[in-house]
Amino acid sequence: MSLALFSTLLAAVFGLAIGSFLNVVVYRVPNGMSVSHPASACPNCHSEIRAYDNVPVLSWFVLRGKCRDCRTPISGRYPIVEAATGAFFLIVAIRFWPAAGLPSDGLHVASRLLELAAFLYLAAISLALGIIDAEHHRLPNRIVLPSYAVAIAMLGAADVLTGDFGGLLRTLIGGAALFVFYFGIAFVYPAGMGFGDIKLAGVLGLYLGFLGWGPLIVGAFAAFLVGGVFAIVLIALKRVGRKGGIPFGPWMLVGAWIGVFAGQAVFHGYLTAIGAA
């Protein structure tokens, strides 16, 4: 088995474990609870979850979706979040694992590994924030604000290690530009944009700016395109009204990941189509 394949599979297993933690985050953070104390327990009988009943995905099926002690049903969201995180980490690892043919000196390898770690972190908070915003219409500061420090530290270090100071500047400009862009929208139309969206925009701008101007532009535009289409469908199906308060955070995250995976190709294709490439 090649090192790249082993590493991506390891990232998937790590993602399963992180998914188990994300289940704690999406339940406790909106309720103002600590994510570390107390230990996880059944909300009905308050029995502490045993270590062997805390294996991601597998434990839920072994227990047949019920508490071992009181047989209260356990939400199917738990294994879904765990499996989704594992799959997401696998895809991100495939995208960002250092590729053959690139400089293989220690600094470049360290830079690419920092880049991978930064985007795995983004994958984790994307799932947590998407679920929380969909359920509570909130993007908690406890998750969003520390993400600025994580993104700047990891992505900045990745650029500095390879001497790409232009890339570092672009990363910071991307964060500031998307923050200001969303702030401007909120200023013009306060009812359509919450301050949580503005703060998240700055984080996403750092990541997209790190990848380039194409991913930044495509990622920003894709959020409005995908979110708008989804809103139109819900309104057409009469699931919500025109002022139904559809949270925008999940679509910002979806748009950002479109920018991550396809932004450069889409942007180049657009420039080619208009004869500017």
Image (cartoon, grey):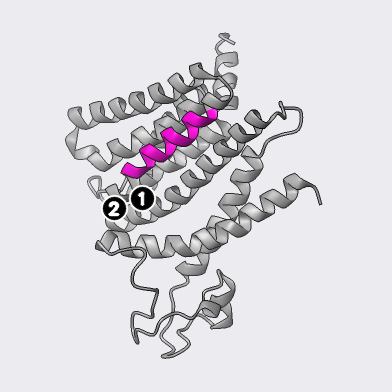
Q: Amino acid at mark 1?
A: Leu
**Is 157 included in the stretch rendered in magenta?**
yes
- Is disc 1 placed on a helix, strand or loop? helix
Q: Which residue corresponds to mark 1?
A: 234
What's drawn in magenta, residue-wise?
Answer: 145-158
The quarter in which the C terminus is drawn is top right
Viewer-closest of 163 and 234: 163
Q: Position of residue 144 (x, y in %)?
A: 33, 44
Name which residue lies at 28% across and 57% down: 136
Viewer-closest of 156 and 215: 156
Above or below — where is 238 with respect to 74? above
Circles 2 and 1: CB distance less than 8 Å? yes
Whether residue 194 is visible, yes or no, is no
Residue 211 shown left or right of residue 181 in the figure:
right
**Quadrant of the rendered structure where residue 17 is?**
bottom right
Q: Which residue corresponds to mark 2?
A: 240
Above or below — where is 262 with respect to 28? above
- Is disc 2 placed on a helix, strand or loop? loop
Q: Position of residue 191 (x, y in %)?
A: 18, 39
Compare marks 2 and 1 and give the one earlier in the sequence. 1
Name which residue lies at 33% across and 84% down: 44
Name which residue lies at 29% across and 37% down: 199
Above or below — where is 110 with respect to 24? above
